[in-house]
Image: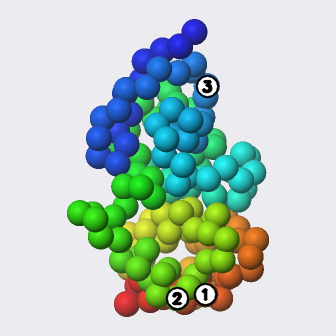
Amino acid sequence: MKRSYELVINGETRTVMSEPGRTLLEVLREDLGLTGTKYGCGEGQCGACTVLVDGRREHACKLAVEDVAGRSVLTIEGLGREGRLHPVQEAFLAEHAFQCGYCTPGMILATVALLQRHPRPTDAQIRQWLNGNLCRCCGYPRILRAVQRAAQ
Ligand code: FES
């Protein structure tokens, strides 16, 4: 049976009617039309569905809607401000750090979380942090440069 849940998505309180147990990823994409968050593996392994929940990196495919009720969710759509890209988005653009772009929203949100924790990360920290975000176009060197640029 469907229930009503209040979620705070990109700073806005949104009410959704959902069966319990549906994933945050399904709610974002199917109910709220926020398709920047991608479905890859559905098992918490690829990072394509990365969002920030209360500022922490999370896999939207592994969170049930009831787990995020009342919590603050940031998706790629909410990252820029006043029509401007976020500096991490600018850095990915400047370094051409994507090919197909499917992993990019997750990479960028993971990077935002990294830089909140380590504003000047070492290359080793970047590699370790992004270990859970897969890129099938093998764009890792450019992604590394983009994160380094964003940290400057
Ligand atoms: Fe969530 Fe792959 S779709 S980690």
Closer to the chain start, of discs 3 and 1, is: 3
Task: Tell me the element at label 2.
Answer: loop
What is the residue that sits farthest to the left in this orientation? Answer: 82
Looking at the image, do the residues carrying marks 3 and 2 touch, with CB atoms under 8 Å apart?
no
- What is the quadrant of residue 129 in the picture? bottom right
Q: Position of residue 29 (x, y in %)?
A: 55, 41
Compared with 92, 59 (above or below) is above
Q: Is residue 83 left or right of residue 121?
A: left
Q: Position of residue 87 (x, y in %)?
A: 36, 77
Amino acid at circle 1: Arg
Disc 3 designates what residue?
21
Q: Position of residue 125 (x, y in %)?
A: 56, 80
Task: Tell me the element at label 1.
Answer: helix
Spatial CA span between label 1 and label 2 = 6 Å
- What is the quadrant of residue 78 in the picture? bottom left
Classify the position of the C terminus by image quarter: bottom left
Residues packed near mark 2 inside 10 Å, few (<14), some (14 to 19) or many (20 plus):
some
Closer to the chain start, of discs 3 and 2, is: 3
Task: Tell me the element at label 3.
Answer: loop
The residue sitting at 74% across, 76% down in the picture is 137
Q: Position of residue 108 (x, y in %)?
A: 50, 69
Q: Which mark is residue 95?
A: 2
Amino acid at circle 2: Glu
Q: Judge by depth and name the residue closer to the eye, 92 or 33.
A: 33
Compared with 29, 69 (above or below) is above
Looking at the image, do the residues carrying marks 1 and 2 touch, with CB atoms under 8 Å apart?
yes
Compared with 16, 116 (above or below) is below
The residue sitting at 43% across, 25% down in the picture is 16
Q: Which mark is residue 142?
A: 1
Spatial CA span between label 3 and label 2 = 39 Å
Residues packed near mark 1 inside 10 Å, few (<14), some (14 to 19) or many (20 plus):
some
